[in-house]
Every structure is written in C-alpha cells, then in structure tokens.
Image (cartoon, grey):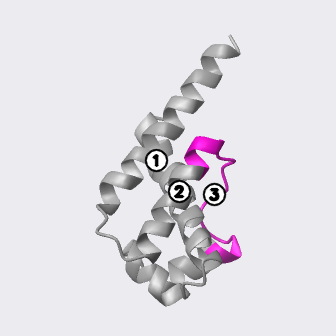
Amino acid sequence: MVEAPCERVLWDILPAIRAAIAVELVKCRVSQVEAARMLEIAPSAVSQYISGKRGYRIEFENKVKMLIKQLAEDLKEKKQVNLVKRICTICQQLRETDENQCKSSL
C-alpha cells in the first residue's frame, strides 16, 4: 500500500517538528509545562518529545533548523505567534527540501 504524503506529515513530520521545537524551548530554559502551554499540547507529550519516546527524529536541514529555532525564540519571548501557520511554513520548507533532494538524486 502506498502512503499518502499527508499520512507522512501527520505521523512523522508534525511530531518531529513539535519535538524539535520542544527541545529548543527547553534548551532556552523554558519549563516543560510552559513549553506544553506554548505549543498547545499536553505536558506529557513534551516530556516524551524531550526523552525521545515520541516524535520520530528527522534530521533537519539548516534552513528548517533555523525556522524551528526562530519559532522557539519567538515563543520564549512571548511574541504574538500564529503557531499553526509557522509550523505549516516549517513543514512546507521541509517537504520542499525533501523533494529537491529526491530530484537531485535521480
């Protein structure tokens, strides 16, 4: 059975992005409870992201890493952030990078 791209986004990419943002927030000395509030997810999810029990680890390219780090910094600084839009931007960048890598390997 062929996996639809949206399935990969739902099961692999979104959890990996959330995990990376949670890790960045904790690196910035944000508590796991506060990180959960900022990401609008349960504190237990943040704990599992931090411990590596949840959120498949994807190796992000530099531009995606920069977008994740900037989002974490904006959240930490309590800037007005459209979380869904920013995560969508990160996801789109990641998918474009993957698509370009696939084309260059053909």
Furthest residue in direction top, as rendered? 106
Q: Which residue is mark 1?
A: 90
Residue 1 seen: no
- Could you tell whether 22 is left or right of 92 in the image? right
- Could you tell whether 82 is left or right of 26 in the image? left
Q: Residue at the spot x=44%, y=34% of the render?
A: 4
Q: Is residue 49 above or below residue 18?
A: below
Element class at badge 1: helix
Whether residue 54 is in magenta: the answer is yes
Q: Which residue is mark 2?
A: 68
Image x and y of residue 50, in percent: 65, 75
Whether residue 67 is in magenta: the answer is no
Residue contact between numbered discs 1 and 2, judged by CB atoms under 8 Å: yes
Q: Residue at the spot x=58%, y=31% of the render?
A: 98
Element class at badge 2: helix
Q: Amino acid at mark 2?
A: Ile
Q: Residues within 10 Å of mark 3 (few under 14, many from 20)?
A: some
**Spatial CA span between label 1 and label 2:** 7 Å
Query: Magenta segment, which residues?
Result: 50-65
